[in-house]
Image: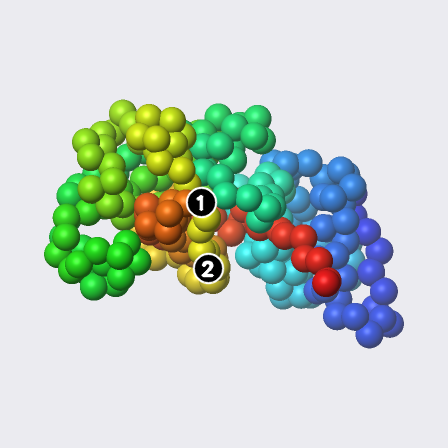
Amino acid sequence: MNQLFVIDKSSPLPIYYQIEESIKRQIEEGELHPHDVLPSEREYAELLEISRMTVRQAINNLVNAGYLYRQKGRGTYVAEKKLEQQLLGLTSFTEEMKARGMMPSSKLLSLELIPANEKIANQLHVTTNTLIYEIIRIRLADNMPMALETAYMSADLLKGLTAEILNHSIYQYVEKHIGLKIGYAKQSFESTIASEVEMASLSIAKHSPILLIQRTTYLEDGRPLEFVKSSYRADRYTFTCTINRH
């Protein structure tokens, strides 16, 4: 059995919170490793002399936070460490994963020319019903699904876009093969609950949290290149930034 810990029942800190922090400490200090199995709720409850409901609350919170994962009928396990992306520069998913020493890949679900609706037309600075590319992909790192991505791109800027081109970094293709310079992007973040499509695409459980990111990328001359909506697995991905006080 994995190492347990001592809780202080006289502490003002809730017991479930003490359990959460103790398990997190074990993970962060390397006492528990990715895919180690945890004691059962019953074992925790008996050894700590507390209720199973208290243990369950702590375990549920850690599962929702991405520290643990469950396998039905088998138990609760330590999750892989989250990938951390620093918000310091504009990179593609492919560039980002390669910089981490991971193998990026994509599963192309759809590549179509469609008429732009009003929202997408506004993002890409085109008129409504202008033909644009809609690209739906599952983005993977070391064959693990990380995000479900839907991108809308100007067909005028990227004539002849193919599935083969999308197997590589689209940013590198734009800059090296088309000769356009990417300038900057505007990006927003929000948390939400996975839809049925996201659950199936990302191999996550019902009601799993996801991080929804929307990005509009612009060329140096100010023309929009793409509008992208990405649903990232919240149990595998986290974003950090450095904020300076001036």
Q: How many marks?
A: 2
Coloured how?
rainbow
Residue topped by disc 1: 183
Look at 82% across and 60% down and name the residue there: 7
The residue lying furthest to the bottom in this view is 12
Residue 139 location, quadrant: top left
* Three-letter residue code for mark 2: Ser
| Quadrant (top left, top right, bottom left, bottom right) of the N terminus | top right
Image position of 21 with respect to 95: above or below: below
Q: Is residue 77 visible?
A: no
Look at 78% across and 58% down and name the residue there: 48
Look at 33% across and 46% down and name the residue there: 225
Give the image location of residue 126, x and y in percent.
21, 56
Q: Nearer the viewer, mark 2 or mark 1?
A: 1
Neighbour tally class for label 1: few under 14, some 14-19, many 20 plus, Cα within 10 Å: some
- Closer-to-camera residue (26/130): 130
Neighbour tally class for label 2: few under 14, some 14-19, many 20 plus, Cα within 10 Å: few
Give the image location of residue 41, x and y in percent.
64, 54
- Closer-to-camera residue (197/167): 167
- Closer-to-camera residue (117/43): 117
* Three-letter residue code for mark 1: Gly
Q: Secondary structure at mark 2?
A: strand
Left or right? Give the position of 195 relative to 243.
Answer: left
* Mark seen at residue 188: 2
Give the image location of residue 226, x and y in percent.
33, 47
